[in-house]
Amino acid sequence: MPDTSKFTVPGLTLGDGHRVGEALQLRLHALNDLQLTLKHVHWNVVGPHFIGVHEMLDPQIEAVRAMVDETAERMATLGVPPIGTPGHLVAARTWDDYTLLRDDTTAHLAALDLVYTGVIEDHRGVIELTDDLDLVTQDLLISQVGQLELFQWFIRAHLESTSGELSNAGAQRESEAARGATRTAAASGGVAAGATTRAASKTATKTASKTATKAASKTAKKAAKKAVR
């Protein structure tokens, strides 16, 4: 960290204020990384549900960008200079870069679910740290987590089955989550297609049977009329 200022907010010791401000630096990096990742997905998502996901992500991107700004400004208020440069982000981050490029909506959403989980869990860690140090910073982080959890719910709604299970459940890496969710979606589609085919087959059989019965009845009536004559 660079040299901090010789002040912090009233009511906190210089040491405590700077400790909280420094804890926010990685949160700033995580939020900057998140908004860039969301925009990356916005550009690269494809498939039947493209427009729904593409447009769903825009408000999330704007909200996370606002979180970046308020986090940086809180750091400066506490007397700790916020660092927003790409090089520092890459050097300091504790997570791998997002790996998916052009991919379908299910794959990207399954991977994004893991991204959100990592950001939220680490935010909660700093919330716990600030419990005895700075309730103002804690309040800011709690508000952010509330929004982030809501956004994750929007994403998980696309991955959740009617029984409440996520198609990427148990995945530890984004690529693993993406492939697992895609396989589940394909299997579900196959089951649905099979059910549709069976239903169509039943309908066709029923129709054919009715047609044959009508034809037989018509033939029998004609035969009866001839016999009477």
Image (tube, rainbow, N blue to C red):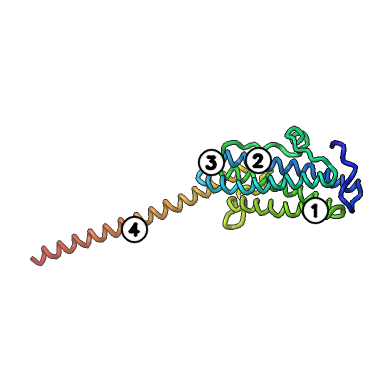
- The residue shown at (84%, 42%) is 80
Residue on which disc 2 sits: 37
Give percent across and percent down for residue 179: 60, 41
Give the foreground label among 1 and 2.
Answer: 1
In terms of secondary structure, where does tag 4 sit? Answer: helix
Is 164 situated above or below 41? below
Name which residue type carries label 2: Thr
How many marks on residues? Answer: 4
Quadrant into which the C terminus falls: bottom left
Q: Residues within 10 Å of mark 3 (few under 14, many from 20)?
A: some
Quadrant into which the N terminus falls: top right
Inter-mark Cα distance, 4 to 1 = 66 Å
Looking at the image, the residue that sits furthest to the bottom is 228
Residues at marks 4 and 1 touching, judged by CB atoms closer than 8 Å: no
First of labels 2, 3 by sequence position? 2
Residue on which disc 4 sits: 206
Q: Residues within 10 Å of mark 2 (few under 14, many from 20)?
A: some
- Going by the image, does 107 lie left or right of 85? left
First of labels 4, 3 by sequence position? 3
- The residue shown at (73%, 54%) is 143
Residue on which disc 1 sits: 138
First of labels 4, 1 by sequence position? 1
In terms of secondary structure, where does tag 3 sit? Answer: strand
Residue 183 in sight: no
Residue on which disc 3 sits: 46
